[in-house]
Amino acid sequence: MKRIQTLIACGVAAAASCATLAIAAPLSAQAATVQMAERAAGGKTQPILVTESGLTLYEFTADKTKHKDKCVEIMGCTTNWPPLTVTGMPTVGEGINPKYVGTQLLPDMEMQVTFKKKPLYTYFADTPGSTGYIGAFAFTGFWYALSPKGKVIK
């Protein structure tokens, strides 16, 4: 389940105006499940990695070093692209090799789920089944989906 933190920002003026901002927090569960689902991606319907709730999982091309999350070092990145985190051991759905799934420790001491040593992320505006952000360029890199074998899907 995606956790949303709410901030209320108020301006100081004669008639104070307020705005509410929703900030995505890391998608986390006791045991995050990496699953496979058929989705329209890369110009055809094919299997991609998703969360148990059907959100697309992304890799970030700026994560050039295995087991290194570059997004956490860029202001605002994890607000838009929350890491998939877990408090227990990640689990896998049918068709996913459990040897490919692991974790890495983030600076905030949360455990981020990895796939073939690549950190996994969701997108804060995604809905289950959505693939519209595959290939997006943001925060110095591209955001691609992954196949169950770890192949990049652009």
Image (spheres, rainbow, N blue to C red):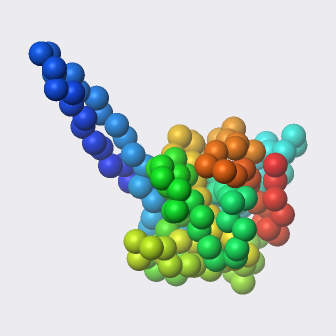
Image location (x, y in percent) of residue 80: 52, 47
* Residue at x 48% of width, y 53% of height: 75
* Residue at x 45% of width, y 59% of height: 26
* Residue at x 79% of width, y 68% of height: 150
The residue closer to the viewer here, 8 or 73, is 73
* Residue at x 69% of width, y 38% of height: 132
Q: How many marks?
A: 0
| Outermost residue to the top | 14
Corner quadrant of residue 113: bottom right
Image location (x, y in percent) of residue 105: 50, 79
Q: Would you say 39 lies left or right of 89 here?
A: right
Q: Would you say 111 lies left or right of 61 here?
A: left
Image location (x, y in percent) of residue 148: 78, 66
Camera sees residue 91: no
Residue 139 lies, with reference to residue 65, above or below; the image says above
| Outermost residue to the bottom | 99
Q: Would you say 75 lies left or right of 135 here?
A: left
Corner quadrant of residue 128: top right
Image location (x, y in percent) of residue 131: 69, 43
Question: Where is the N terminus found, in terms of image quarters?
Answer: bottom left
Corner quadrant of residue 118: bottom right
| Outermost residue to the left | 14
Camera sees residue 125: yes
